[in-house]
Amino acid sequence: YNYKENMYTVDIDEQQFAIKPMNCPGSLIYYNFKPHSYKEFPMKIAELGRVHRHELSGALHGLMRVRAFTQDDAHIFMLPEQIKDQIKGVVDLIDRVYKTFGFEYHLELSTRPENSIGSDEEWEAAENGLREALEELNLPYILNEGDGAFYGPKIDFHLRDCLGRTWQCGTIQLDMQLPQRFDITYIGQDGEKHRPVMIHRVAFGSIERFIGILIEHYAGKFPVWLAPTQVRILPISDKYNDYANEIKKALFDKEIRVEIDDRAEKTGFKIREAQLQKIPYMLIVGEKEAAEKTVSVRSRDNGEIGSISLNEFIANVSEEVKSRKNVIQD
């Protein structure tokens, strides 16, 4: 009822069905497969789930806002006294994810909307739980009144890209309502049934949106550790394809993402194309390199580097990948 206008529905044999708009019910149904004890908490259930939402056509925007996307959902079931510690843990997780990719972000605390379910007391307790967790972490936040989910308040993470635009991705939602609607319980220390508290959390939010933000943030010029192809080998003629394949195997064995451009094209053409495709490193292979077991290295960002041994190149790239350097260059 509270989300029906955003769902795709169809009537089959006089019964209404809907394409899944969110992953939450699946976690609750899974929880109910068997009885649970307080000793099992916090219980964490994760799912990379495909969801479909009927967004207005005017709101659609490339990969940033789509009608079908994949969420990195997790649902954490816990005791009331575990709320603050679990929220802190999720905040730390999302912070580490965004820092890994080199993003800055700000936080917004969204409170009870008009179409909410639940009592005033439950909403007050839930909002206070989120607020106190943020304050204990000394994290500044913007209060976004009335923008919570219909079942609970939330903390939203808004990424800032290289152009200064912000995108809402990660979220932490505290929920005391869906556990009631799905009648989930646990056996407490007193031997009686009690209702657990539930947290919904995503770090990327929409995998598609996050990829779109990454592409725009780096203008397609991904750092080495993130680039889909890290190295492209360019043999100057077919005579050096065997050595090019030796190099490819050596790089592949060190978990470096590599490919060979062995087309019958001029080397300058291959270099320009690799540069346009923003490949971090190009290895030009000819007679001298094959004889000396070296590689002539060209960097996407720094141009010609010169001839070095294959082992030295592998060591340099491996170290660059390991450090996860996230410098955005003009």
Image: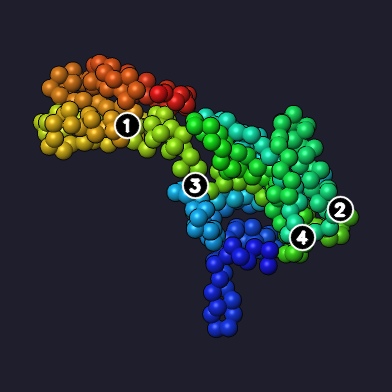
Nearest the viewer among 304 and 59 is 59
- Please, is residue 250 above or below residue 194 in the view? above
Q: Is residue 111 left or right of residue 250?
A: right
Q: Position of residue 3 (x, y in %)?
A: 64, 63
Which quarter of the figure is the C terminus placed in? Answer: top left
Q: Which residue is located at x 43 percent, y 38 percent?
A: 215
Q: Which mark is residue 121?
A: 2
Of the image marks 1 and 4, the number of the one nearer the N terminus: 4
Q: Amino acid at mark 3?
A: Met
Which callout, 3 or 1, points to the residue nearer the camera?
3
SS category of the residue bearing label 4: loop
Q: Is residue 69 left or right of residue 23?
A: left
Of the image marks 3 and 4, the number of the one nearer the N terminus: 3
C-alpha distance separating marks 1 and 2: 56 Å
Q: Position of residue 112 (x, y in %)?
A: 76, 51
Number of numbered discs? 4
Q: Is residue 262 left or right of residue 35?
A: left
Of the image marks 2 and 3, the number of the one nearer the N terminus: 3
Q: Which mark is residue 117?
A: 4
Residue at the disc numbered 3: 64
- Please, is residue 323 above or below residue 202 in the view? above
Q: Are marks 1 and 2 in contact (CB under 8 Å)?
A: no
Residue at the disc numbered 1: 279
C-alpha distance separating marks 1 and 4: 51 Å
Q: Amino acid at mark 4?
A: Ile
Of the image marks 1 and 2, the number of the one nearer the N terminus: 2
Q: Which residue is located at x 49 percent, y 53 percent?
A: 60
Q: Residues within 10 Å of mark 4 (few under 14, many from 20)?
A: some
SS category of the residue bearing label 3: loop
Which quarter of the figure is the N terminus placed in? Answer: bottom right
